[in-house]
Image (tube, helix red, strand yellow):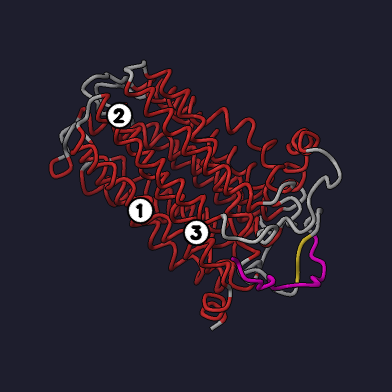
Amino acid sequence: MRFIHSLTHSPGLWRLLLVRLTSQLSDGAFQAALAFSILFNPDRQTEPMTIALGFAVLLIPYSVIGPFAGALLDHWDRRRVLVWVNVLRAITIALVAFTMGSGAPESAVLVTALLVTGCSRFVASGLSASLPHVAGRDVLMEMNALFTTLGAGVLALGFVISGALRALFGSDDAGSAATLLAGASISLVSAGIAAGFVPRFLGPDTPDDAGHSASYAVAHGLGHGFRAVVNTRTVAVVLSAIGVHRFVFGINMLMILLIVKTLDLGPIRGHDVGAVTVVGAGVALGALFAAFTTPLLIHRIGRRWTIATALILAATAEALLLQLSWISICLSAVLLGLAGQTIKLCGDLAMQADISDTYRGQVFAVQDAVFNIAFVVAMVVAAMVLPVASPNAPVVVLCAVGLYVVAALGVWKSHPKDVRGADPRLHYGDEGAAIPSANPSPSVSSST
């Protein structure tokens, strides 16, 4: 009943949800258009290491500066950040389209695209940090599940939109450039919706480094973010679990890309986007299941057991890849999507419930760095060890299974016991210790 009450009595919640959905729709359209343009473009040929380095170019630069830039989410009005970064993202997507249409090499396209990726991650961190301002602490888990489920749906819809535009405009450089522009227009819609919030409605309530300049806040952002993570054990443990999952996921992604290009797997064979789409749909389906199962698990068995169980499930899913077939790949994709999304939802809850609002944006930026760096390192490692002619490597898969098992044991040993949802009577200070909250529920001032 509290969940339904929050949905119907917090006007800012629906506006934030619309910003999230349009932002992820823009992301989905852009990511799909970029992937199709480089991986499956007759004008371009892509090797495994080129794919891995392409992801490195897209993700590493922001991952390095993100923990610093995250300080701006705790220093500036988050509403203003969501508006202007969405506008900047639209401009940079248009720049990527121009670069692609001009026939520039992959390196130039990817360097331009990293600006879009940085904007997208900055917006995502701002949205996550803002959620506790429009939802009560006692329903944060359910709201995260709702936002994530609907967000995954529109992300997939963005892929569909780009796929349809690709069929309309063509798969060459010119057609790819036209397809990319869809993401720019949707990003402008997201900016317009975010502009409807009143100033400071999304926080921060107490800006970090108040009275200092933005450059001062950025210079100290890395230290503040990491210190908040280290001093909050629930957050440190779940971020470690997220890092392990993303590392294995990076290996799996490159392996699947190589598999669909080289092996005949029956119903999902195909050296184009078809097979990749099937596997991606499996991951999305698993993530959808997680939206329903994770809140139930957290309230019944607590966060520690939920995260550890998800890691064991991921190990089981990974073991299925020892025997490659279209059934084992699709089943593994569903289970890995379920496990990964469960861990991610637990991480979001920990950062929203256990971290002070003054540092929350910086901690979400630290999560992005862990998320992306683990993924890119894994892809580079996989590109060096996976054979192109026969990309199924049992030793690599077994190592991934072992990583999941070790991570599960680490969570079980290190995570505080009996931590379930977010207690609406408490908030957490800099050292991760619970202290009474003077205002457990968000103010329900309306957005314009």
Amino acid at the residue labelled 2: Ser
- In this view, the residue in front, 231 or 87, is 87
Sequence-wise, the earlier of marks 1 and 3 is 1
- Amino acid carrying label 1: it is Ala
Other-residue count near label 1 (Cα within 10 Å), few / some / many at <14 / 14–19 / ≥20: many
**Residue 440 image offset from top left, x and y in percent:** 73, 73
Above or below residue 346? Residue 436 is: below
Of the pair 84 and 255, the residue shown nearer to us: 84
Tell me the number on the disc at residue 309: 3
Percent of width and height locating residue 101: 32, 23
Residue 37, disc: 2
335 inside magenta stretch: no
Q: Which residues are magenta?
A: 433-448
Residue at the image point whose x is 13% and y is 45% from the top: 267
**Residue lying farthest bottom?**
1
Q: Secondary structure at mark 2?
A: helix
Foreground of the two, 281 or 192? 192
User: Where is residue 189 drawn, in percent x and y?
Assistant: 45, 51
Using the rendered view, name the quadrant where residue 347 is placed.
bottom right
Helix, strand or loop under label 1:
helix
Quarter of the view holding residue 63: top right
Image vertical order of residue 215 relative to residue 155, above or below: above
Nearer the camera: disc 1 or disc 3: 1
Residue 263, position in %: x, y? 19, 31
Q: Give the mark nearest the N terminus, 1 or 2.
A: 2
